[in-house]
Image (cartoon, grey):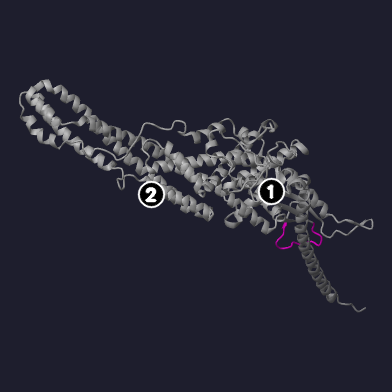
Amino acid sequence: MKRCKGSITIFLTLILMVMFMLICGVLESARVTSAAARAKSITYMSLDSCFALYAREIFEDYGIMMLYSDKEELTKSILEVGNRNCYRAKHDGKYCADIYHMKVDKTDVINIKHISDRNGELFAGQICDYMKMKIPEDALNALVSKNENIKQGEETGKEFESINECNKQMEKLEQELIMMKKYCVYYSDVTGEPVVLINNMIVNGTASYGSYVSWYDEVNEYLQKIISYGDEVEKISSTALIKVNKSIKELEADKNKYSKDVYDSMMDELVHIRDSVDITATDKYKVVECSDKASEYAVILNNINNGVLKYKASEFKDTKYLDEVLDDCKLFKKEGVDVSIQYSDEKDEVQDNMYESGVRSFIEKGILSAVIKDTSALSGKSLLSKAALPSANEYNKSAKWKGWSGVRLTANRTLLSEYVLQHFGNYINSKEGEIDYEAEYVIAGGDSDRENLKNVAERIIAIRSGFNFVSLLKDNEKRNEAYGAALSIAGATGIPAIVRIVQFGIMFAWSSGEAVVDTRNIMGGKKVALIKSKNEWNLSLASLISMNIVDRDSDDENGIGYEDYLRTMLYVTNKADVSYRIMDLIQLNVRKKYNSEFLINKCIVSADVRCTFGIGRVFGGVIPGYGIGDSGKYALEVRGAFEY
């Protein structure tokens, strides 16, 4: 029988085995690559699903998206959702084929950000994104413009404070000048003729020495006083001039903060003060001349006294020492030791400082009593404890926020302030909350409604004082009235610089008194023009002492109301403070309305996750780039991130 050779069969078998292994490798590679893509999809689906469980009540009430969860709970949720997405769903009652054999073995949340992180930037960013959808660009620009206009009032008030420092210096200068003038008069009265005293000692010896000593002590004291007061006058005048020049430079540097008419009025007043405050440069009142002459005579007097002391040492016998000083006595005169000012001890005691004291005494009775008709209706609510509030945690108020600079900073600050007014109550427009004056809390951060309202009222008065002062500067009739009052209370000398600064002080006191009246009307729901006309002015200078409050019967259609001032105060309040205090209010209100244990610090707004997948080996082999885990499966790590 003939045998058949099997070499071809074995060869084909080997080829088929190689082809089979190649096909299996290709299939395994395609399957694992597909599984990797699905793992990435599952990771993001898991994140989307978990973060879709945001606090719906907070979003509906405040437009803020946040997940009320902790790291452990979020990790567990992502793991569970991920594994549910790994298994194929049923189709017609039967499971579909699972070619991946995939499972989430481990999930790590590696970077969680809470809503209160990054110094309030994350929270404020959500607010701005939310408000951009609600406020058109032209409306936003109008709000920015209004805020900038109202800010000028407070800035003007700050400028006055620096001038007030100059005022204090000039008050000191006036007193020093008065004393210098008095000692000049004393010196003139007692100087007499020292030659006569010396000749008497030559004739009478010791009998006339006592008269000389009394004369010398008195004259020397007056000269030293004149020199001392002269030095002090020069020093004060120089200090006052420095302060005025500093105010002028600051005003020039802040020129862009003011409208042209406000800037021009302020600068005009400062220049007038500067021109009259330096009384020693031209020596208009002969202060320098008087001081120099007093110093010259003090040297001569010392030479005379040295001769007399030598005469005394010779036991009043050697008169040659007196002969030596007779020429000095002829040089010692009373001429030139005087300042060219007139003063009187008589002052109008009724008007002295009455304007400032009238406003001060009225306000000291209580800001709220001054600006609110019925204080008994005010809220008495307060925060019992702020320890659990977000603002109680330490945060950097000066931290730089990404994208919060230049024009965007201005727009974002405006959006923040508008958000507060739309979502929280205030004195004029209250809403049900843990406290009544919520917008005032965001501005002041005090523990009680009354404390926060008081702070806001004081700031409105400050803003109104600035604008009222500008109104006075533009009203020549009222300026002249204030100047007349200044003449009667400017002190004894009537020096123009002092009179002008007193006039300045009277005008600002008048402005402050009018500001109290304005604030009362504003907090009563009325509107008041920023810069008032003559017809809109309420308080006369004569009634400033009594502070008779007049409530306006009608609004100024183009005026500014209470919420406009709140908006501007929010606009200039530190952005981190605003952010955290809004969080305070949300936490307080959510606790009261939904969950008594709610803590906004636990709310998550973003997370990075690392999921480790196990992918079963179906066709065998090892795919390059994929490790083998302890379970014998391919180990695949996928990272994902989510942020509201």
User: In front: 90, or 633?
Assistant: 90
* Residue 190 drawn at (x, y percent): 22, 29
Q: Which of marks 1 and 2 is in front?
A: 2
Q: Is mark 2 on a helix, strand or loop?
A: helix
Q: Quadrant of residue 285?
A: top left
Q: Using residue 628 as the reference point, say whether residue 575 is left or right of it.
A: left
Residue 448 visible at all: no
Say what amino acid the circle numbered 1 marks. Answer: Tyr
Q: Nearer the viewer, residue 63 or 416?
A: 416
- Looking at this view, name the residue that lies furthest to the top: 207
Residue 170 placement, left or right of 519? left
Residue linked to disc 1: 419
Q: In this view, does 361 lie above or below 616?
A: above
Residue 557 x, y percent position in the rendering: 67, 50
Look at the numbered disc 1 and give the secondary structure of its residue: helix
Mark 2 residue type: Asp
Residue wearing tag 2: 275
For marks 1 and 2, give the CA distance.
Answer: 48 Å
Considering every residue shown, the one lying at the far bottom of the view is: 2
Report the front residue among 344 and 278: 344
Q: What stretch is highlighted in magenta?
A: 616-627
